[in-house]
Image: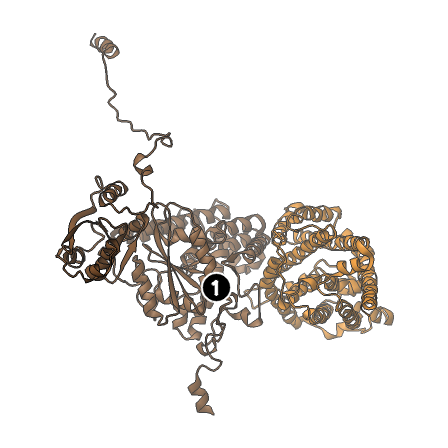
């Protein structure tokens, strides 16, 4: 069952917010905290500004390609072979990020609530709704996501507001963290936290009105910057030790502090419940994109049945990691570099040369 | 010795089996029904009355059917006599109408033969003469096929056959008893109309006509069923409803190949988009005002003869959470009720599941003092929570079902037994904890707050899934169930309309709050997902008096 319906501006934005939200939930802010220390929030602002320029460039290059994603541009530039190469690289990217996410999230859930439950059982449980949703197509994913995004946003905002009573402003000092270079020069890891950029390369053909592409992309980068800044500041000002430790789901630490009177003192499970819903949206989108890219590079008709084998890949890939530590080290040592090279170098160059070729042809 | 003699007798003499064992023949597929095979429903009416009588005798099994009236008589036109036959069903036709306004004009001698003299073709002239002069009814149809005769006669009309004419006159002399218009039984409102649909199709269509004072209301008739043809009316506003929607409804109704349908519930199941999903996909209502509201919004209403419920297509999720009362009240009151209903829906579906999830996996969510109380109350209960909750939920469902079936005079008994079983006795016997009684009771009460009967059923079914999911994986289980269910609903359509419209897909931000109703003067647009011919239902400034006054 392949649903080729297009999605509107709000639905697309909601999907990208989910990607951003999950980046925050999954502890990506801690990667910045590790590299930039107390200067992380300045680093995020600098990175956001740089990424805004990058996004504007992408939008300008994509403007010439109507209803095209990066695969179509690759095909235009380097025929089928380049399309397959870029496609495989992106399949690997989305597969890899999903596997890391799934493993990290399920492992954390196991530690928090399901000590006696086998990990594979938790992963399979998470995979079932993901497969169902992805099988029904993007329309179903965006619709489901749209139902839960407001709840996820409210949860995050509530979390930041309620934790503000524990803020100690002095904790953001030294303001330049680990030094001027670490604060003002974006590292590979910091760039990879803005993983929403990867989705810009694929979302355009799904939009009902392509004129909204630029608006959606810019709003997404700004929201990503805002969410990351707020989350990093909240963590920094609440916990003095946060820049020196590797906490699992560091936002979960904040949820432990949320209290409403004497009656509701430990409501972290409610936040985790909302994050599970959000993560299911995120993983469904990734699974759909993987199947869709494979469909495109193999010229298949539908993504419906492809969802099953790729969900098997998801399961197998996330079971490859030995533990959370191996997920984190893979993220730091491999994924950040892979992501940065693919998005900011390969995809950018493909788009740039495609744009020049198209411009030359038209003129 | 006697025993021995008896045994010899039994062995040698014929001894018929005294037990009466009737076994239904299993191979009756091979037995041909000769009477049925001789009946061809599409046969044309013969010009010979004798042939027609023979045909009707076979078609209506008049020798064994006691209520079939075949009344032969002679009519005289210009001194020429014609044999005639009146066919009707006793109890369906009105004797008074038949005697006074059908037989009396026909049996009296007719000398008014001016038309016969003008026209040379005697057959046509007799036909026209009878039609114009002898049948003083407002609804008379000339039919040429026996199937058309059957449609009329089984609906309460009379058929008149005249020798030498190869047509029959179907005359409306309906006179069967039917229930009068009564109060709605299941959709009660405080403010609003107090009349409900009845079983008679024409009464129902007349109610709609009365409430919609516009010639744009179209009432199309069709029939469903091959053995018993149920009359079905498709109603819509020609200038509002989407043409594709109307065509789709008619297409589905005209392509149902079943022997019979007896109620609108049958039709609903036969024409809904996805029969595997328990969620209702068409609105069923006994309230004409609700049907009218939906008609004027651009939906299609289906009425079935014999059923006091109208079907409305398409039906989306939020329709089933709306009460007919909502539109009669001020928006503030209606919205308060809507919030309460939404909470009730949430509780009905998830509360038992969440309770078991919290008890098994997330007990830290419960405040410490309350947790101690719950733990103390469960201390003497030997069963796990899952057993307790399933036991109580099934008991509650049993009491609910029994309450529906029990005769009215002993109805209160079920309440007493229910209170005893669900209440004090179960706790005293240490079968369940008091907290669980509260959970089940709240869930039960909330389920009654869901306005739609079918949605109520759906949530009662899915509640058990969530109990299971909460048991195996706590809030994770609830989350995956909820996510999968919404994904499935996102993919569901009702007559082309997305089931979760107007939220998914979200066409504009205003739609995000369309569960709540705005003030009546702000309800400018019809629902987006209906794609009506008239998207606006009122002017931008509907309260013009106020505008003129302020300027």
- Numbered disc 1: secondary structure: helix
Figure chain in orange: A
Residue at coordinates 58% horizontally, 70% vertically from top-left? B508
Quarter that holds the N terminus of chain B: top left
Residue A286 x %, y %: 69, 56
Relative side of B434 to A321, left or right:
left
Identify whether A308 is placed above or below B121. Answer: above
Residue A322 x %, y %: 75, 47
Whether residue B136 is visible: no
On the image, which quarter does residue B134 sit in?
A: bottom left
Q: Dot 1, crowdedness within 10 Å: few (<14), some or many (≥20)?
A: some
Relative side of B64 to A158, left or right:
left
Relative side of A316 to A263, left or right:
right
The front one of A206 and B109 is B109
Residue B59 x %, y %: 28, 42
Q: Which residue is mark 1?
A: B243
Residue A20 x %, y %: 70, 64
Figure chain in brown: B
Residue at coordinates 83% horizontally, 56% vertically from top-left? A333
């Amino acid at each position: 069952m392949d649903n080729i319906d297009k999605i509107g501006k709000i639905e697309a934005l909601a999907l990208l917010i989910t990607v951003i939200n999950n980046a925050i939930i999954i502890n990506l802010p801690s990667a910045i905290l590790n590299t930039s220390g107390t200067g992380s929030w300045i680093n995020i602002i600098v990175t956001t500004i740089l990424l805004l320029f990058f996004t504007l460039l992408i939008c300008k290059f994509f403007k010439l390609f109507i209803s095209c994603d990066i695969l179509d541009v690759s095909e235009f530039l380097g025929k089928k072979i380049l399309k397959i190469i870029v496609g495989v690289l992106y399949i690997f990217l989305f597969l890899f990020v999903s596997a890391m996410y799934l493993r990290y999230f399920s492992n954390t859930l196991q530690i928090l609530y399901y000590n006696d439950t086998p990990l594979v059982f938790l992963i399979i449980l998470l995979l079932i709704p993901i497969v169902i949703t992805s099988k029904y197509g993007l329309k179903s994913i965006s619709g489901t996501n749209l139902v839960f995004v407001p709840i996820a946003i409210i949860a995050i905002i509530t979390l930041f507001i309620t934790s503000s009573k524990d803020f100690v402003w002095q904790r953001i000092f030294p303001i330049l963290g680990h030094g001027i270079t670490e604060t003002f020069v974006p590292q590979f890891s910091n760039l990879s936290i803005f993983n929403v950029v990867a989705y810009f390369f694929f979302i355009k053909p799904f939009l009902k009105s392509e004129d909204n592409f630029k608006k959606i992309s810019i709003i997404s980068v700004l929201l990503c910057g805002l969410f990351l800044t707020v989350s990093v500041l909240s963590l920094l000002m609440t916990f003095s030790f946060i820049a020196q430790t590797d906490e699992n789901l560091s936002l979960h630490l904040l949820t432990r502090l949320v209290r409403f009177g004497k009656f509701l003192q430990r409501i972290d499970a409610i936040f985790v419940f909302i994050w599970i819903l959000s993560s299911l949206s995120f993983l469904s989108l990734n699974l759909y994109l993987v199947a869709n890219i494979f469909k495109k590079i193999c010229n298949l008709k539908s993504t419906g049945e492809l969802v099953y084998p790729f969900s098997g890949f998801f399961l197998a890939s996330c079971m490859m990691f030995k533990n959370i530590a191996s997920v984190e080290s893979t993220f730091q040592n491999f994924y950040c570099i892979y992501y940065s090279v693919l998005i900011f170098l390969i995809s950018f160059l493909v788009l740039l040369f495609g744009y020049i070729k198209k411009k030359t042809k038209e003129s | 010795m006697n025993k021995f003699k008896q045994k010899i007798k039994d062995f040698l003499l014929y001894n018929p089996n005294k037990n009466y064992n009737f076994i239904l023949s299993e191979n009756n597929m091979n037995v041909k029904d000769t009477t049925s095979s001789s009946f061809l429903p599409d046969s044309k009416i013969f010009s010979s009355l004798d042939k027609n009588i023979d045909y009707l005798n076979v078609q209506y099994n008049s020798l064994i059917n006691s209520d079939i009236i075949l009344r032969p008589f002679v009519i005289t036109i210009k001194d020429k006599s014609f044999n005639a036959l009146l066919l009707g069903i006793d109890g369906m036709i009105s004797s008074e109408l038949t005697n006074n306004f059908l037989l009396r004009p026909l049996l009296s001698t007719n000398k008014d033969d001016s038309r016969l003299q003008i026209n040379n073709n005697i057959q046509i002239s007799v036909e026209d003469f009878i039609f114009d002069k002898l049948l003083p009814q407002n609804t008379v149809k000339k039919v040429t096929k026996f199937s058309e005769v059957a449609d009329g006669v089984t609906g309460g009309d009379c058929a008149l056959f005249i020798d030498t004419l190869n047509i029959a006159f179907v005359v409306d002399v309906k006179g069967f008893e039917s229930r009068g218009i009564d109060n709605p039984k299941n959709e009660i409102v405080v403010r609003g109309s107090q009349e409900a649909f009845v079983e008679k199709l024409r009464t129902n269509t007349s109610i709609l006509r009365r409430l919609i004072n516009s010639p744009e209301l179209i009432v199309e008739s069709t029939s469903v069923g091959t053995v018993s043809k149920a009359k079905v009316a498709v109603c819509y506003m020609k200038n509002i409803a989407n043409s594709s929607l109307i065509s789709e409804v008619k297409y589905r109704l005209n392509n149902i190949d079943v022997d019979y349908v007896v109620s609108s519930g049958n039709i609903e199941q036969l024409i809904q988009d996805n029969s595997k999903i328990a969620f209702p996909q068409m609105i069923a209502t006994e309230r004409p005002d609700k049907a009218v509201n939906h008609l004027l919004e651009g939906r299609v209403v289906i009425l079935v003869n014999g059923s006091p419920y109208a079907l409305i297509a398409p039906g989306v999720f939020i329709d089933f959470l709306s009460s007919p009362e909502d539109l009669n009240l001020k928006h503030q009151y209606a919205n308060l009720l809507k919030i309460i209903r939404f909470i009730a829906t949430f509780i009905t579906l998830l509360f038992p599941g969440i309770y078991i999830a919290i008890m098994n996996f997330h007990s830290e969510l419960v405040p410490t003092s309350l947790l101690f109380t719950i733990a103390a109350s469960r201390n003497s209960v030997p069963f796990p929570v899952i057993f307790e909750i399933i036991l109580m939920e099934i008991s509650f469902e049993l009491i609910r079902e029994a309450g529906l079936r029990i005769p009215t005079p002993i109805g209160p008994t079920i309440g007493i037994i229910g209170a005893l079983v669900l209440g004090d006795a179960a706790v005293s016997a240490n079968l369940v904890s008091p907290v669980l009684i509260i959970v089940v009771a709240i869930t039960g009460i909330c389920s009654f707050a869901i306005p739609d009967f079918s949605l109520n059923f759906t949530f009662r079914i899915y509640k058990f899934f969530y109990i299971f999911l909460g048991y195996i994986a706590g809030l994770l289980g609830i989350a995956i169930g909820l996510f999968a269910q919404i994904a499935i609903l996102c993919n569901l359509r009702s007559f082309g309309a997305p089931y979760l419209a107007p939220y998914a897909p979200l066409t504009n931000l205003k739609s995000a709050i369309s569960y709540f109703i705005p003030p009546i003067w702000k309800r400018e647009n019809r629902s987006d997902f209906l794609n009506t011919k008239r998207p606006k239902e009122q002017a931008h400034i509907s309260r013009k008096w106020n505008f003129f006054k302020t300027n």
